[in-house]
Amino acid sequence: MSTYYILRYHVVDDYVTKRTPYRPEHLALTDEFAKRGFLLLGGAVGDPPDSAVLVFRCPLHEIERFVELDPYVQNGVVERYTIQPWQVVTGAVHDSVA
């Protein structure tokens, strides 16, 4: 099975307001990737949010495609992002770890 990855978006100030015009397209994209089984979880972090985290389980190139298509990235709502592999060792959903 594919590795888990964490996509972290570092967002602009007043993110909640600035994302509004792009939110329907962004959520359609997240729904598409979730239906394909690639996107497991996602959401804003903080109050008010200063970042967002999305958890994927798919090949890295699919996450890179997600970022390229995301209207938040295309329209400057995301200042920068990182993609990191995540080694899951405990929890309700994980593969056996040697």
Image (cartoon, rainbow, N blue to C red):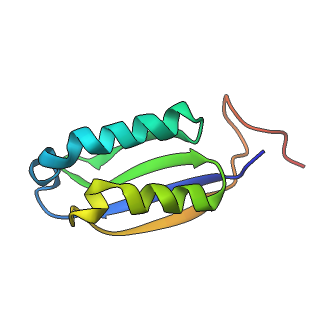
Q: In this view, does 97 lie to the left or right of 46?
A: right
Q: In which quarter of the image is the N terminus?
A: top right
Q: How many numbered circles does the render carry?
A: 0
Direction right: furthest residue: 98
Q: In this view, does 35 lie to the left or right of 21?
A: right
Residue at 27 percent across and 56 percent down: it is 72
Residue 42's image quarter?
top left
In the rendered view, tell whether residue 60 sits above or below residue 47: below
Name the residue at 50% across, 35% down.
Answer: 34
Residue 19 image position (x, y, % from top left): 17, 50
Left or right of 83 in this view: 9: left
Q: Position of residue 40 (x, y in %)?
A: 53, 37
Q: Nearer the viewer, residue 1 or 84?
A: 1
Q: Is residue 62 left or right of residue 30?
A: right
Front-most of residues 34 and 90 = 34
14 shown above or below 94:
below
Question: Residue 89 appears in which quarter of the rendering?
Answer: top right
Depicted 77 relative to depicted 95: above or below: below
Q: Which residue is drawn at 58% across and 42% down?
A: 38
Q: Please state the horizontal and vertical placement of residue 62, each as a whole percent of the image.
A: 57, 55
Residue 13: where, in percent of width, then height?
A: 13, 63
Residue in front for this viewpoint, 18 or 28: 28
